[in-house]
Image (tube, rainbow, N blue to C red):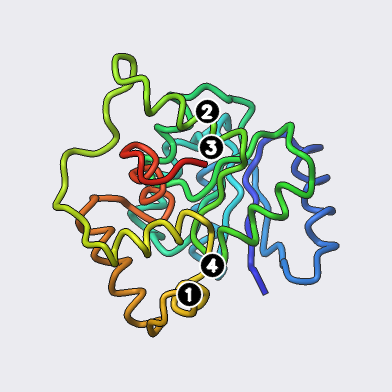
Amino acid sequence: MIKLALADDQVLFRRGLTMLLRDLSDVEVAFECSNGEELLTGLKNNSVDVVLLDLEMPVLNGMDTMKRMREEFPQVKVIVLSMHSEEKFIVHLMELGANGYVLKTAEPDEIEDAIRAVASTGYHFSPMVSRVMLHGLVKKEKLKPTFDDVDPLTERELDVLRLICQELTTTEIAGKLFLSPRTVEGHRNNILQKTGARNTAGIVVYAMSKGIYTP
């Protein structure tokens, strides 16, 4: 069961989405709230796997909330809900540590897919968001590189990286590469350390920026 929290100050949108998610057999809405401060308080009192986080909220906005979450609740995965589709905006949120980015205009199925993917693999980018990110990352004159030069990845680490980008779970990667899940996690940790990425989503951003993976 995926335990989820929803933070959005638009009451009708929040209540409608909560009702939709409560119909899913594998998702439990632990709580909903209207701003970042309420979310942080709720996370102290509830065990949550994934947060759906709006960016434009009163009291404490989504961007500042996510910065605090990465310090206080690093294990909780964050899917940003936003009306903004600009490339620099999306890439910046990924660099801050978001695990996924979904536009508020998305179909309900996409939000459901994002929740399940983030819970199981650590990231989810819709095709549209992936294209926007890739376009921004290749425009060197307008967007600074996301990461500094890093230690070269080994061939096996590159194999693991490419499969991570395909949204495979640790168990699925282990099966494809004939490795143990523990070994796959070791490679994943090495990739995180070498790239300086905050999470799996950051690994994917790195892979896209270096041309290792193209969505």
- 1 or 3: mark nearer the eye: 1
Q: CA distance from mark 1 to mark 2?
A: 30 Å
Amino acid type of the residue that numbered disc 1 sits on in the rendered structure: Lys
Instruction: Quadrant for residue 67, please give it.
Output: top left
Mark 4 residue element = helix
Percent coordinates x, y for residue 188 in the rendering: 33, 66
Residue 27 vertical placement versus 214 (above, below)? below
Q: CA distance from mark 4 to mark 3?
A: 34 Å
**Residue shown at 64%/52% (left/top)?**
114
Q: Earlier in the sequence, mark 1 or mark 4?
A: 4
- 4 or 3: mark nearer the eye: 3
Question: Which disc is residue 132 wearing?
Answer: 2
Q: Earlier in the sequence, mark 2 or mark 4?
A: 4
Question: Which disc is residue 130 wearing?
Answer: 3
Mark 3 residue element = helix
**Residue shown at 33%/44% (left/top)?**
206
Amino acid type of the residue that numbered disc 2 sits on in the rendered structure: Val
Please tell me which residue lies in front, 207 or 41. Answer: 207
Contact flag, marks 1 and 2 (Cβ < 8 Å): no
Question: Which disc is residue 45 wearing?
Answer: 4
Q: CA distance from mark 2 to mark 4?
A: 37 Å
Percent coordinates x, y for residue 15 in the rendering: 80, 46
Percent coordinates x, y for residue 97 in the rendering: 39, 47
Amino acid type of the residue that numbered disc 4 sits on in the rendered structure: Asn
Question: Which disc is residue 176 wearing?
Answer: 1
